[in-house]
Image (tube, rainbow, N blue to C red):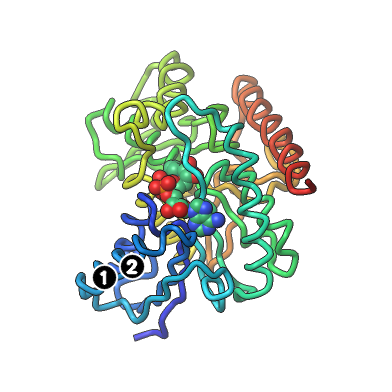
Amino acid sequence: MASPVRVVITGAAGQIGYSLVQMVCRGDVFGPTTGVIVHLLDIPPMLEALGGLVMELEDCAFPLLKGVVATADVQQAFSDVDAAFLVGAMPRREGMERKDLLSANVKIFKAQGQALDQYAKKSVKILVVGNPANTNAAICSKYAPSIPKENFTAMTRLDQNRACAQIAKRLNKSAEQVKNVIIWGNHSSTQFPDASAGIICDDSSCQKVVDAIKDEAYLNGDFITTVQKRGQAVIQARKLSSAMSAAKAACDHMRDWWFGTKAGEFVSMGVISDGSYGAAKDVIFSFPVEIKDGQWKIHQGLSLTPFAQEKIKITSDELVEEKEAALTVCQD
Ligand code: NAI
């Protein structure tokens, strides 16, 4: 068996944490033969609940679980970690806008960036889930200058999974048959879900999603708004934000980063922008990426219609604004 991977999950006592930790311990992320030592971080008032989670983890008797560190101390939580799921933050409640969350949450990610900088391995792969995820990732990176910028990513995989599921449902197929449907920009209502490079495959062949759906008005209309508003729809129904699906998406993101994407396939990740496809530089922008040997690369060469260019500009402008607001909050 390979040596165990040290994985920190912040906000472990929360609802995403509850689903995520068992997926990680089951081998869904680092593979079925790699042991894991999980570091579970939450805030002091949640330590009792975290203790309950530790009991449950023991009772699961996961063969791959080689150790648990449950703590409210960032030094303990981040020491020597190989992978970080930064989930802990205040979640959006019904009627709350993402902007309200920004002030509260970016300060958490400033402090955690500083802690990662001091205590984590320099090769640590960081996935920010807590909202506003893209901007939190940008702040975290800014305050962790000794860790490469490429190691900070934000989660738009849930949006991608939602988009694939919508296409699959309409075509009466399964979601894993739908590939290369992507999310551009921010994990917010300005995100641009884009099926124009998407394909749908069965055992023997693949077809373009646009040719299978044959409904441009849907793909440029209801498809986009359904995916953009899916988070709100789940909150309205559950009175809580998406949790199981968010944990599954976090696992998908980290697993693909760890093991790579298949030839000819790309996935959506919020990564540091180099200005590709007209996006603003230096924000954490969701692009189509290919991954090999643990390194992501923006997939180039997709053609963008004027419609797509406009959508990318809207979400890019929002990210620039959000980052400026976050930097102001951090200087206070
Ligand atoms: P939750 O409220 O159930 O859990 C959050 C946990 O974080 C709580 O246990 C809380 O005590 C903890 N926490 C707060 N401040 C912390 C800190 N400074 N250090 C460590 N832990 C801290 O929330 P839930 O549902 O698990 O969601 C977590 C975050 O994920 C929210 O920000 C939510 O908006 C976001 N989210 C992001 C998605 C995405 O696609 N990027 C999808 C769904 C949720």
- Contact between marks 1 and 2 (CB within 8 A): the answer is yes
Q: Nearer the viewer, residue 155 or 208?
A: 155
Q: Nearer the viewer, residue 253 or 299?
A: 253
* Disc on res. 89: none
Q: Nearer the viewer, residue 63 or 298?
A: 63
Instruction: Identify the residue shown where x is 68% and y is 27%.
Output: 313
Q: Amino acid at mark 1?
A: Met
Instruction: Identify the residue shown where x is 60% and y is 20%.
Output: 307
Q: Secondary structure at mark 2?
A: helix
Residue 260 in sight from this viewpoint: no
Q: Quadrant of residue 327?
A: top right
> Quick one: label 2, few (<14), some, or many (20+) residues within 10 Å?
some
Q: Quadrant of residue 149?
A: bottom right
Q: Where does residue 217 sit, x and y in percent of width and height?
A: 44, 13
Q: Nearer the viewer, residue 214 or 147?
A: 147
> Quick one: label 1, few (<14), some, or many (20+) residues within 10 Å?
few
Instruction: Identify the residue shown where x is 41% and y is 32%.
Output: 231
Q: State whether residue 58 is above or below residue 186.
A: below
Q: Where does residue 110 sit, x and y in percent of width and height?
A: 67, 55
Q: State whether residue 314 is above or below residue 113.
A: above
In-image side of 305 versus 282 (left or right): left
Q: Secondary structure at mark 1?
A: helix
Tell me the quarter of the image containing the N terminus. Answer: bottom left
Q: Where does residue 211 sit, x and y in percent of width and height?
A: 38, 25
Q: Where does residue 95 sit, x and y in percent of width and height?
A: 46, 24
In-image side of 274 versus 166 (left or right): right
Give the residue furthest to the top.
Answer: 217
The residue that label 1 is drawn on is 55
The residue that label 2 is drawn on is 51
Q: Amino acid at mark 2?
A: Gly
Q: CA distance from mark 1 to mark 2?
A: 6 Å
